[in-house]
Image (cartoon, rainbow, N blue to C red):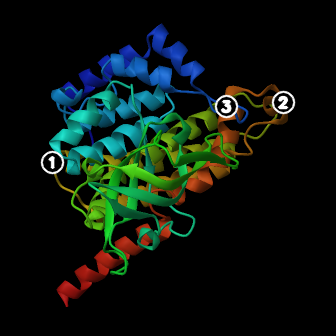
Amino acid sequence: MRFGFTEEQQRFRADVRQTLHSAEVRAAAVDATGADGVEPDVRPLYRLLGELGLLAVHWPAEFGGADRPLTDAAIVAEELVRAGVPDTLHVNTIQIVGQFLLMAGSTAQQRRHLPGLARGERFASVLYTEPDAGSDLGALRTVAEPDGDGYRLTGTKVFSLKTRFVDLGLCAARTTPDVGKYQGISLFLVDLSAPGVTVTVIPGVGDEQFHRVDLDSVPVSGDDLLGPRDQGWPLLNEALAIERTGLDYHLKAEHWLEAALEALVDREPDSPHDAYLEQIGRWDGALTADHALAWEVLTGLAADRVDPVAAAVAKYHSSELAQSIAAWAADIPGPEQRANRTRAAVTLDSAYREAPGLTLSAGTSEVMLQIMAAAFDSIGQEKR
C-alpha cells in the first residue's frame, strides 16, 4: 500500500492548484455553486476547465486528453473539489461514462464522443436505475427492440443527476427477453435530445435534483451499441468496480469536516468546544485511513488491476464515513450562523440532506458488505 506522492505528482498537483486558483476559475466556480434549492447550470465552468485541459488528463491525446496516468486524473479530481468545483458532471461524464467508453467502446465511438466530453462541450449521465431495479440491476425492464439496423428503447430510468444539462446517456436495456435474469442485457449510448426522450425532475430534499427519464420507442443506431450485444452484465460489473474508488465520497467527507471546523470556530465563545474538537480529531484520523483506501484502489487501476473487493471496501468505508460526518456535524452551526446563512452553515445543511443517498448510490452498503463477505468466505473455503 502506498502512503505518499512522488515529487512529480506533487509538482503536478501544485500546477493544477495554481491554475484553479486563477480569478477566472474562482469566479466561474462561485457562479456554479447552488444554494437554497436552486441548481445552477455548471456547464460554463466545465467549458472553461475543458479549455484549460483539466477534465480528462489521463485520456489519450487523440481523444482530448494529455496521456497522463490515471493517478494524475485522481489528483485533478481532488483539486477540483477543493477549489469549489461541483463534481457531479465530472464524475458522471469523465469518470464513469468516459471511462466506460475507453474500456468497452469501439474506436469509432471513442473518436465520436470522447473529444467533446474532454473539452467540456458535451456531457453524459448514467441511466441504469429503474423504479423496480435499484441495487439489483438484473431486475431492469427497459427493452431494446430491433428496428432495421438499430433498436428502439422503451422504459423508464430514475435517479439520474444533472440529466437536464447533459447530451448523452449510458443506458442499460434488455435486448433478448426470456433468458436468465443477468443475461440478455446490453448497453447503449442514447442521444437525450432524440424524439421519445422525456426528462422530468423528481422532487427531493437535496440541492442536486434527481431526474426521471422516460424512453418511448427512442431510436438508436446499431453504432450506439456499447460492447457486444447481450454482454452488458459483465461490463456493468467491471465498470462499477472501476467506479467504486471511494475518492468522490472521501472528498465530500473532507469538505464537510472542514465546514464543521469552520462552524465550530465561529460559534459563540460560551458554547462548548472540547467534545467537538476531540471528535474532529477522530474524524480526521478516519479520513486519513479512508484516503489510503481510495488511493490503494486507484493505484491498482493505474496498473490495470481491477479488484472488486478492494473497491467495495473503499466505497463502503468512504460513503459510511461521509454520511456519519454529515449527521454528526448538522447541529454544530449555532442559531446566529443559521440565521446569517454563513458558508459553513449552508454547507452542513446541504450535507445533511445529501448524505443519506451516499450509501445507496453506486451500490448500497449492504451490497458492498455482501461482496466482502463472499470474498472472505471464498478464502476460508480455499484454506479448508
Tell me the distance, in whole angstroms, between the alpha carbons under discs 2 and 3.
Answer: 12 Å
Q: Nearer the viewer, residue 227 or 323?
A: 227
Disc 3 vs disc 1: which is toward the camera? 1
- Check residue 344 in the rendering and tell me which mark sits there, or answer none: 3
Q: Residues within 10 Å of mark 1 (few under 14, many from 20)?
A: few
| Residue on which disc 2 sits | 339
Q: Residues within 10 Å of mark 2 (few under 14, many from 20)?
A: few
Does 225 sit above or below residue 261?
below
Q: Quadrant of residue 235?
A: bottom left
Q: Earlier in the sequence, mark 3 or mark 1?
A: 1
Residue at position x 27%, y 29% in the image: 115
Residue at position x 70%, y 48% in the image: 205
Q: Earlier in the sequence, mark 2 or mark 3?
A: 2
Give the amino acid at mark 2: Ala
Give the amino acid at mark 3: Ala
Q: Earlier in the sequence, mark 2 or mark 1?
A: 1
| Residue on which disc 1 sits | 303
Q: Where residue 331 appears, x then y in whole percent?
A: 74, 45
Give the amino acid at mark 1: Ala
Q: In the picture provided, is 273 more to the left or to the right than 69? A: right
Residue at position x 47%, y 10% in the image: 24
Q: Quadrant of residue 269?
A: top right
